[in-house]
Image (cartoon, helix red, strand yellow):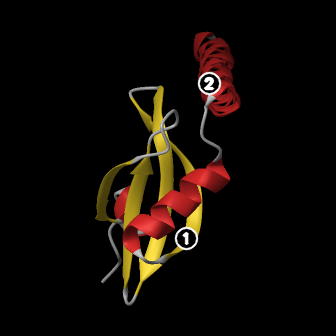
Amino acid sequence: MFRSKIIPVTLTIAVALGGAGTIFAANSHQDDEQQEAAAVLNAKTSLLQATAAAEQHTGGKAIDAGIENHNGKVIAYDVKVVKGNTVQKVLVDLETGKVLRVTAAKSEHEEDGGHEDE
């Protein structure tokens, strides 16, 4: 009898805690999106201008653009540019529109930290 009461109670607690974690994660993601939106709205440089700066600096063509976050803080526009057979990640300052850094872009697979099945 005792065991039959513990299992439903344990299950209820596990579901409640799991739901709280999901709510926290959703709120955290929503906060990140709000911070990104505020940063872009307050920026002196538009995403279009940042994309043009990245293309001009590298001589390539933009294929993706977004926001670069570091420790929850928006730091720059992140523009992926392709030139020849390489893809470069170009960080462009939100305020000045100047290129801050150009690095080799990681593939989505590398960014996720996944490993291919062999």
Residue that badge 1 annotates: 62
Residue 1 lies, in percent from the top left, at 65, 13
Please report the residue visible at 55 percent of the width from the left and 52 percent of the height from the top: 50
Q: Amino acid at mark 2?
A: Gln
**Is residue 90 positioned above or below 71 on the image?**
below
Nearer the observer, 33 or 100: 100
Please report the residue visible at 63 percent of the width from the left and 49 percent of the height from the top: 47
Residue that badge 2 annotates: 35
Mark found first going from the N terminus, 2 or 1? 2
**Is residue 92 positioned above or below 6 on the image?**
below
Looking at the rendered image, the disc whose residue lies closer to the viewer, 2 or 1, is 1
How dense is the environment of label 1, judged by Cα within 10 Å: few (below 14), some, or many (20 and up)? Answer: many
Residue 118 lies, in percent from the top left, at 30, 84
**Is residue 31 positioned above or below 92 on the image?**
above
Residue 40 lies, in percent from the top left, at 65, 34
Q: Is residue 27 left or right of residue 53?
A: right
